[in-house]
Amino acid sequence: MDDYRDLMTVALVLFFAGLMLVVGQLYLEHTTRQDLGTEIELPYVPTSSPILSSRVGEHSGRTLR
């Protein structure tokens, strides 16, 4: 680091590295804010078991006499 150009190069590299970190952080915050509204929750529809709701002999293949 005898030359002032070395110091300027290091300063420029550190500036751009910091700039890239800030831009990356802003990008991550922006995408997480945008993704919150895109999730669609499916409505819960309770279904009963076909075994409990069927009548005797209806689905079992047996006929009642």
Image: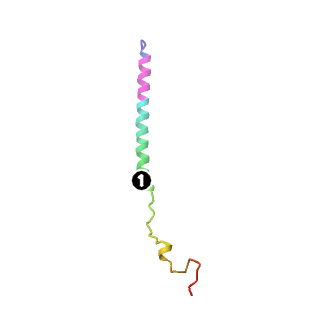
Magenta-tinted stretch: 5-15
Query: Magenta segment: does it hold 2?
Result: no
- Residue 28 lies, with reference to residue 48, above or below; the image says above
- Which residue is at 51% across, 80% downward? 56
Assign the magenta stretch its main secondary structure. Answer: helix
Q: Nearer the viewer, residue 1 or 59?
A: 59
Kind of element beneath mark 1:
helix
- Which residue is at 55% across, 80% downward? 58
Which kind of residue does numbered mark 1 sit on? Leu
Res 24 quadrant in image? top left
Check the image and name the residue furthest to the top: 2
Query: Magenta segment: does it hold 9?
Result: yes
Q: Nearer the viewer, residue 2 or 54?
A: 54
- The residue wearing badge 1 is 36
- Which residue is at 44% across, 34% downward? 20
Neighbour class for label 1 at 10 Å: few (<14), some, many (≥20)? few
Residue 4 horizontal/vertical position (percent): 41, 15
- Count numbered badges in the picture: 1
